[in-house]
Amino acid sequence: METHNLKTQSNIIVGLFLVIIGFLLLLRNFGLFHFNIGDLFRLWPFILIYSGVRMLPIQEKTRVWIEMAVIILFFIALVTLPAISHHQNFDMQFGLR
């Protein structure tokens, strides 16, 4: 029963991730939140991090907390990246333009 409950928690995390991404894209379409779709693709390493966390041989409860932390960091990066990427030194330093 506990395994089913933890699997449900993991599904909730992934579901919330998709809902929040959809909500941010909707806000972008209405002009209330400004970022480029390309900013999402700049954050592709989070896919590797999230996948790696899913594969770790740790307790499911610990994994769920780490997954939540990775997703929170993803959204922090998503919200701050547009402001940071407009700074020309950042773009030139990392070859983003």
Image (cartoon, rainbow, N blue to C red):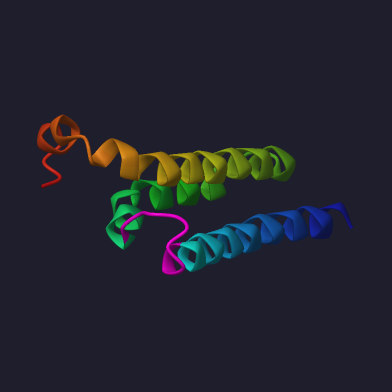
Rendering coords of residue 97 (x, y %) = 10, 47
Q: How many circles with numbers are drawn on the protein?
A: 0
Q: Assess whether residue 32 is covered by the magenta stretch.
A: yes
Camera-side residue of 38 and 8: 38
Q: Residue at x 48, y 39 (%)?
A: 76
**In the image: residue 50, left or right of residue 57:** left
Main secondary-structure element of the magenta-colored stretch? loop
Q: Assess whether residue 43 is covered by the magenta stretch.
A: no
The quadrant of the picture occupied by the N terminus is bottom right
**In the image: residue 7, left or right of residue 35:** right
Rendering coords of residue 22 (x, y %) = 53, 66
Rendering coords of residue 83 (x, y %) = 33, 39
Q: Which residue is drawn at 50% across and 38% down?
A: 73
Q: Residue at the front extreme? A: 31
Q: Which residue is drawn at 62% across and 43% down?
A: 68
Residue interval drawn in magenta: 28-36
Q: Residue at x 14, y 35 (%)?
A: 88
Camera-side residue of 44 and 50: 44
**In the image: residue 33, left or right of residue 40:** right
Camera-side residue of 69 and 20: 20
